[in-house]
Amino acid sequence: MPKTIIPPVAKIIPKILEKFGNIRIDNYFWLKDRENPEVIDYLKKENAYYKKMTAHTKEFQKELFEEMKGRIKEDDQSVPYLYNGYYYITRFEKGKNYPIYSRKKESLSAKEEILFDCNQLAKGHSYFQLGGLSISPDNKLASFSLDTVGRRIYTIQVKNLQTGKILSDKIEKVTGSAVWANDNKTIFYSSQNETTLRSDKIFKHKLETNQADDVLVYFEKDETFNVEIAKSKSRKYLAIESGSTLTTEYRILEADNPDGKFRIFQKRVRGLEYSINHYADSFYIMTNKDQATNFKLMKTLETATSKENWIEVISHREDVLLEDIEIFKDFLVLEERFNGLNKIRIMPWSGEGEYYLPFESETYTAYTTTNVDFETDTLRYAYQSMATPSSVIDFNMRTKTKEIKKEQQVLGGKFDKNNYTEERVWATAKDGTQIPISMIYRKGLIKEGSNPLLLYAYGSYGHSMDATFSSTRLSLLDRGFVFAIAHIRGGEDLGRHWYEHGKLMKKKNTFTDFIDCSQFLIDQKYTSPQHLYAEGGSAGGLLMGVIINLAPQLYHGIIAQVPFVDVITTMLDDTIPLTTGEYDEWGNPNVKKYYNYMRSYSPYDNIKKQNYPNVYVSTGLHDSQVQYWEPAKWVAKLRNMKTDNSILFLDTNMDAGHGGASGRFEAIKELAKEFSFLLDLEKIEK
């Protein structure tokens, strides 16, 4: 890479930030103002610097893009599912970026009815997202929502599916999701606070009336809670969920009675989490009630929903996390997690002959998918491993026979899963905890320390990082890379306790687990510091920021996508989207012990004069989750403080938000940038 091009230098305007007598000087606070032309100019200069510095990889990026695109079946479609008399299908056409949503009445041989062609709707927009697609009970109308900025602020509209016309309804500045009451003329939707983007209100809208006339059904006053509304699988109930990190509360209303009053299912009790599924005359409740850390299943009559009426169906287990359930007329299906792996458990209501679906790999993912019908013996689930492309499978729970409805095709003619080795190993953390690592690499790998290895992790919000297949990842594997996932604490990979030991005052376990996994892979000679790379996005970007402050010597390169790196300043600003709802994850820095703990690891606040690895940082100007100024400030400060000649890039998508580019091929172009960064550092040129 050329070293003679001078990187941009952000000007220094010191701002004093004081809390609990602790003074922080933020020299780049001014970058927070996106309306300031100097801010936009700085971001553009960083983009120009990135383009100049990587000009020699431009052709390689194009080759990588075409290579990855070439493995994708462009004229692909989802497995149809039957709902309320129609088969619903999502499909893509060759060369087009966006999906087409369609349906067929009663039979797959019936004429296709196009609901939405997103390629047409996206014309003229650099970013496009269709969300909240919901069909009315009489099948005649569809509510849908559009976001053309990337900030996850949607406009809801309604389409007449018989005439193809868009109705006059226009519900603006909302979350995008909506549900129908059973009268076919009432929609319930959620909206967010315009400043914080916290989803805090549920409204009721009557068709062909003005948004100004919509009725506020529920307002969530607690700033640590978000609200959403959904309809039960039975179609009998509408349910408003108020949720925070630690606590949930539901309100329910019969969908036949949209003008009725929602009633509380079980009032909130701090620390009590529950979710509800309706079937027949009862609700089934997944809950952590009575210290059921890994959750248990309970049941109550729909006429008596408070917790004193709940009866245990599946008891709590210390070593098994209950993740989800599916209810059928004759079967109860549990999604469980044991020893870091997904399990699907089939339980006949008769009480006899329960069993688990058999899965053999140690680096796989399995989960139930679209199961909208109670009156069936067929369970639809998906399966994949790091070397096995995804399959959608219909499984007859009575006969125990299965039909593979779809296997992900990997085009190009070169892919053979037998060319790859999948492996799960365990690293020992500094406190003795065993941390699983899932890996894939080309067969014949020799462990002598010179293999490039990309280690990925997230480690927050109880989000488990499952071992999945990726056709684009083959572009690294086939060039000699090992790809590994560190299942660090902060996720729920090994149960709820795994999450509890990676949040709040135990958050540092997340970071040290990753470093210990990195050291283990080096010690076992899978790789070496000269060839080890790390990647993480959002809260995983926070992880990247911490590890390069603590152990920069272990890594040759880092990819940080939309990184959350300015922890204290962000968490002290309750006007920033999502902040107040995060207090139970990170702690409230208005409380001294949490402030001091965050201060001890916040990446931006702990940059020091030392050598850093090569770093590629990506962000979106319209990101509503991690504001663009966090990575921008972080890069500016790193440039000023680091004592080396390593590469540092800030790549800002001026048209996108947290999820990056919206089209399926545009997203691959962003991936090609990341891969070329790694391969260029490894001096792999083709």
Image (cartoon, rainbow, N blue to C red):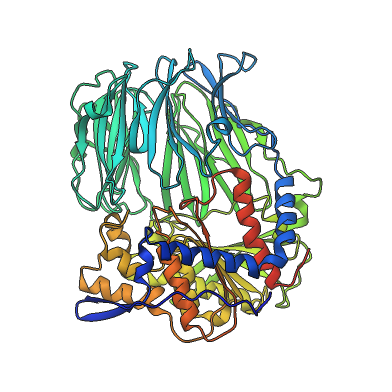
Most foreground residue, 157 or 283:
157
List the single residue furthest toward the right.
413
Position of 229 relative to 6 (above/below): above
Most foreground residue, 452 or 671:
671
Which residue shows up at 57% across the image and 40% down it?
357
Q: Residue 641 placed where, x, y %? A: 46, 83
Which residue shows up at 52% across the image and 75% down it?
516
**Left or right: 269 in relation to 182:** left
Position of 586 relative to 307 (above/below): below
**Left or right: 511 in relation to 280:** right
Which residue shows up at 69% across the image and 74% down it?
1
Q: Residue 16 placed where, x, y %? A: 27, 77
Q: Residue 51 placed where, x, y %? A: 62, 64
The answer, for residue 358, to whether it is visible in the render is no
Most foreground residue, 471 or 642:
642
Q: Residue 93 placed where, x, y %? A: 66, 32
Quadrant for residue 314, please give it. Answer: top left
